[in-house]
Image: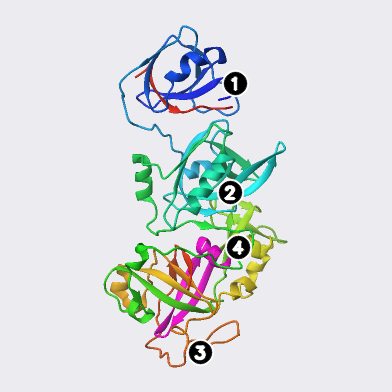
Amino acid sequence: MKFGETFDMVLSDVRGKKIHASVKREHLNRFERLIVPGEWRAIENFGLTYATGQFKATDHRYKMGFMAQTRVVRIDPLSDSYFLSLTAFNDVLNGGLNQNYLIDVVGQIVNVGEMETIDVHNQPTKKIDFELRDQKDERLPCTLWGSFAEQVFTACEAANGEMIICLVRFAKLKTYKDVRSISNAFNTSQILINPDLPEILEFKDALPKDCLALTLIESKPKSKIDEFPTGDFYLQFAKKTIKEVSEMFDVGRVKVLCTIYDIDRDWSWYYIVCKKCNKKVTKVVMTSLKAQLWCETCRAPITNVLARYKLHVKVMDSSGEMKLMLFDAMSSEIVGCPANNLLDGSFDEIEDPDILPDSIKNLIGKTYQYLVCVENENKRYQMHDSIDQCSLMLTYSEEPSEATTPSSKRSSDTSISPADNFSTTKKLCLDSIKIVKIKQEMVEKNNEAKVVGEKLNF
């Protein structure tokens, strides 16, 4: 609230129908103590005007105005609902929404950029960009400013590898260069981290069961992998070799320490997605002169794209070898920068996937500890089918571990050959183990309404 302006709020009836209400400055002292977020009130003798303005907090045709004759009475609670109106990511991304209305969005935070300080009207203001994902693994870009940015950044730093669910109430829709995203609407919006609400718990249960954690993305490669505090959660899992994992019949999680000895160049290390819908695009010949990128979801040729990682790495320990597939969030973590940074805007390189940037080559010879989830497929097919990994704990060292790579097999080359005594019966045909989580450590009624929005400063 600011003096000289109105005190604004959002009210909801028991059916969840919301309306924007305001109190003028001259009536502020009378009503301010009666307006408490989350509590129920009976309101009589109020005025109605048409709802105007660029950003509307509700879709109601009218706006309520408190007057001198208005009467506000405390009543018993009629519902404990938070009256969310959650918007699907796809409705945002396909551009079908009216940008004059604010929306509610909930998602899991998966990729977080650095905290930036930007000059806004000659005032330093915090800014953070991150991605939310929904139950269908759709990704929605989000930008927050000021105290909202600090709130999200602090929560991410303290996550300790746990899932973070972010609820953005009264979010503003944005479109820039055909890329749709959300942002806070000045101080109107509300940010709730991991709120204990039925709708949020239901959303969390419907997320993909891959234990994907957030990734903090820096603007430049890391010179040192930050220490990740280990906890009792990881101590409960037994350590296994690659061979022992392949022979497991019980569904469960185990830790595997192994070394990346090569990058599979039969596959491209990245793929291209449409910024508008975040779906993979294909290259097609639209004219006889030039191939263009085509987005099947948007049903149109596009130019506004970005790259995402899809690394296929070969790993080994003293008992055997296998392949791992690292998707964007995880690859960004270990490489130290987004795939777009390595391509520098030149997507023509997709024609030659064999060319690897130095940042990816540098993964060769490094040892990581994976928290592997062995699913039913491994029980059925043993060595001849993939193991879906639902989480990954990385333990990084500059040199391969003595326990995983014999010293005679270390090399300064861009690949490290598996040990010569690995027979074909020991090689594991485990195609594309999917890595979906990364953590790191050094080895080492009608007039009765409920206030659902504190105040709206337009």
Pinpoint residue 454: horizontal percent, then vertical percent: 47, 28
Q: Which mark is residue 95?
A: none
Q: Is residue 164 magenta?
A: no
Q: Are marks 4 and 1 in contact (CB under 8 Å)?
A: no
Q: Is residue 203 left or right of residue 126?
A: left
Pinpoint residue 59: horizontal percent, then vertical percent: 49, 26
Q: How are the residues colored?
A: rainbow
**Among numbered discs 2 and 3, the one appearing first in the sequence:** 2
Pinpoint residue 184: horizontal percent, then vertical percent: 56, 38
CA distance separating discs 3 and 4: 30 Å
Q: Which mark is residue 129?
A: 2
Pinpoint residue 452: horizontal percent, then vertical percent: 43, 28
CA distance separating discs 3 and 1: 72 Å
Q: Are marks 2 and 3 in contact (CB under 8 Å)?
A: no
| Tag 3 residue | 407
**Among numbered discs 4 and 1, the one appearing first in the sequence:** 1
CA distance separating discs 4 and 1: 45 Å
**Among numbered discs 3 and 1, the one appearing first in the sequence:** 1
Disc 4 versus disc 1: nearer the observer: 1
Q: Are marks 3 and 4 in contact (CB under 8 Å)?
A: no
Q: Is residue 329 magenta?
A: yes
CA distance separating discs 1 and 2: 31 Å
User: Which corner quadrant of the image does residue 45 belong to?
Assistant: top left
| Tag 4 residue | 337
The magenta stretch is 310-336
User: Which corner quadrant of the image does residue 411 belong to?
Assistant: bottom right
Amino acid type of disc 2?
Answer: Asp
Q: Which mark is residue 3?
A: 1
- Disc 2 residue crowd, few under 14, some 14–19, many 20+, Cα 10 Å: some
Query: Which of 435 and 255 lies nearest the eye of the viewer?
Result: 255
Residue extending farthest to the left is 250
**Among numbered discs 2 and 4, the one appearing first in the sequence:** 2
